């Protein structure tokens, strides 16, 4: 069991090292998915008022992985430390993970929110219907917290 956990941690480190979340420094982005067989970087973003956090969304063969990262060091030469991760089964057909830019929560106004739901066209754009699950990036505690889906609203002019 200990050996299996060590291998899992090593693979996770290798996987995360092969992806870079661009910071506001204008550094180039590299996504070498060949180093992470079966996984593709689906999304990633810088979070927080001072850009000290970020997240990466990876789509793998049989699951999806969200990593919550803390940036350490000066902007031009930042290191990434994974502080939490969320492993999800593949979404059902028609459902997808909605990025933080489109979601907000009445209960957690200051934290970025992601949700699992289904886009639906409405008169003035799109909104997410049937939110199955939702999570917040708890910037104060440095963790991903599951939150009640009924507190979340996701919408966009274009999905």
Image (cartoon, rainbow, N blue to C red):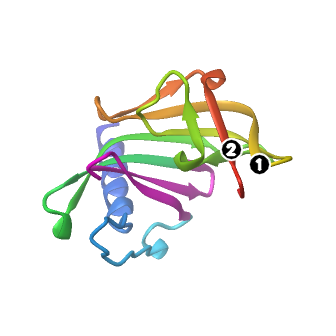
Q: Which residues are magenta?
A: 39-64
Left or right, 121 with respect to 53, comes to: right
Instruction: Check the picture and name the quadrant holding the N terminus.
Output: top left
Direction left: furthest residue: 73
Q: Position of residue 25 (x, y in %)?
A: 27, 70
Near-viewer residue (78 or 38): 78
Distance from disc 1 to disc 2, alpha carbons, whole Å, reads 6 Å
Residue projecting furthest to the front: 124
Percent x, y of residue 120: 82, 45
Which residue corresponds to the image point at 55% horizontal and 24% vertical from the top-left? 106
**Residue found at x 28% / y 30%:** 140
Residue that mark 1 sits on: 126
154 relative to 9, above or below: above
The residue at 63%/46% (across/down) is 97
Q: Residues within 10 Å of mark 1 (few under 14, many from 20)?
A: some
Q: Residue at x 13, y 62 (%)?
A: 74
**Label located before the other in sequence (1 or 2):** 1
The label on residue 155 is 2
Q: Position of residue 112 (x, y in %)?
A: 46, 39
């Amino acid at each position: 069991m200990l050996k299996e956990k060590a291998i899992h941690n090593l693979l996770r480190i290798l996987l995360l090292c092969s992806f870079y979340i661009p910071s506001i420094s204008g550094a180039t982005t590299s996504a070498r998915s060949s180093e992470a067989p079966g996984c593709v970087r689906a999304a990633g973003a810088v979070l927080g008022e001072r850009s000290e956090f970020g997240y990466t969304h990876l789509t793998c063969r049989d699951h999806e992985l969200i990593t919550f990262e803390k940036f350490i060091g000066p902007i031009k030469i930042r290191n990434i430390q994974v502080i939490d991760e969320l492993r999800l089964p593949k979404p059902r057909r028609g459902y997808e993970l909605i990025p933080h830019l489109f979601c907000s929560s009445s209960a957690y106004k200051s934290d970025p929110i992601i949700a699992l739901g289904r886009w639906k066209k409405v008169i003035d754009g799109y909104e997410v219907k049937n939110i199955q699950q939702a999570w917040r990036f708890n910037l104060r505690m440095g963790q991903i917290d599951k939150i009640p889906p009924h507190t979340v609203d996701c919408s966009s002019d274009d999905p």
